[in-house]
Image: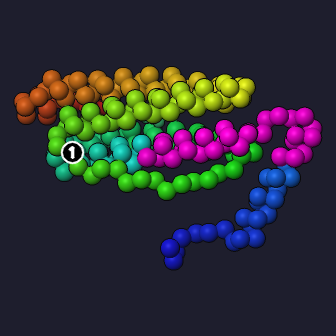
């Protein structure tokens, strides 16, 4: 891209050199807080999954705007922001543990759904998938005796309980509203006020 910002190659090389030297120094000093490559790579993948989550919620927000359901759109946009904070939490953690960042391309999410129920169905399933990813990460960190990462992941384990509950509740309510336009608009109004 013509106008995108890139660090000069020499600066990139210097950063990598500094990280490598610092990692060796810390190891020599017996400070074992440097993240292992395996955990670092797994968290880098999780960053991608969290960014995809943000994309998915944002795409659903746009879809609901086109359906004149601005309450659902606001609800989805709020959750997209939350997903960005999840990605940033992992991002900062990897750098704090002297790891390397390897940002990957984010897949494009779907752009439309057959109904509000179909959208909530997909986002609920997606959150279940994210829970499985977090659990797998925790399992990996436990196997590697990386207790700092386990502590970080415990926050995400609790967060996923909330995320699944919120999306499941919205799905069930949308199902209850069914074909009733009045009930759907009432639910949309409620969601716009920040009530799940
Ligand atoms: Fe960050 Fe909704 O998972």
Q: Residue furthest bottom?
A: 2
The percent position of residue 118, horizontal first and vertical second, equals: 22, 37
Label 1 Cα crowd, 10 Å radius (few <14 / some 14-19 / many 20+): some
Quarter occupied by the C terminus:
top left
Q: Is mark 1 within 8 Å of ligand 1?
A: no
Name the residue located 14 percent from the left edge and 32 percent from the top edge: 184
Judge from the rendering whether residue 65 lies leftward or rightward of residue 132; answer left or right: left
Judge from the rendering whether residue 81 lies leftward or rightward of residue 138; answer left or right: left
Give the camera-side residue of 97 and 125: 125
Q: Is residue 62 above or below residue 15?
A: above
Q: Which residue is mark 1?
A: 113
User: Quarter for ligand 1?
Assistant: top left
- For numbered disc 1, what is the local secondary structure? loop
Is residue 56 something that shows in the picture?
Answer: yes
Name the residue located 73 percent from the left edge and 39 percent from the top edge: 35
Q: Which residues are magenta?
A: 23-52
Name the residue located 46 percent from the left edge and 53 percent from the top edge: 106
Q: Main secondary structure of the magenta part?
A: helix
How many circles with numbers are drawn on the protein?
Answer: 1
Q: Quadrant of residue 37?
A: top right
Is residue 72 something that shows in the picture?
Answer: no
The percent position of residue 15, horizontal first and vertical second, equals: 76, 59
In reply to whether residue 40 is colored magenta, the answer given is: yes
Name the residue located 16 percent from the left edge and 40 percent from the top edge: 115
Judge from the rendering whether residue 191 lies leftward or rightward of residue 161; answer left or right: left
Q: Is residue 17 above or below residue 50?
A: below
The percent position of residue 25, horizontal first and vertical second, equals: 90, 45
């Amino acid at each position: 891209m013509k106008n995108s910002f890139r660090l000069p190659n020499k600066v990139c090389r210097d950063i990598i050199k500094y990280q490598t030297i610092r990692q060796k120094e810390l190891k020599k000093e017996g400070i074992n807080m440097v993240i292992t490559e395996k955990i670092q790579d797994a968290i880098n993948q999780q960053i991608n999954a969290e960014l995809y989550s943000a994309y998915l919620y944002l795409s659903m927000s746009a879809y609901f705007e086109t359906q004149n359901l601005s309450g659902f759109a606001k609800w989805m946009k709020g959750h997209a922001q939350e997903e960005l904070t999840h990605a940033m939490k992992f991002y900062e953690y990897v750098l704090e543990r002297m790891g390397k960042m390897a940002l990957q391309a984010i897949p494009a999410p779907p752009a439309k759904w057959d109904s509000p129920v179909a959208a909530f169905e997909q986002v609920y399933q997606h959150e279940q998938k994210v829970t499985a990813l977090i659990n797998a990460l925790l399992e990996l960190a436990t196997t590697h005796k990386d207790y700092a990462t386990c502590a970080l992941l415990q926050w995400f384990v609790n967060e996923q309980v909330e995320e699944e509950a919120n999306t499941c509740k919205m799905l069930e309510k949308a199902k209850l509203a069914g074909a009733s336009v009045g009930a759907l608009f009432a639910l949309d109004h409620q969601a716009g006020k920040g009530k799940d």
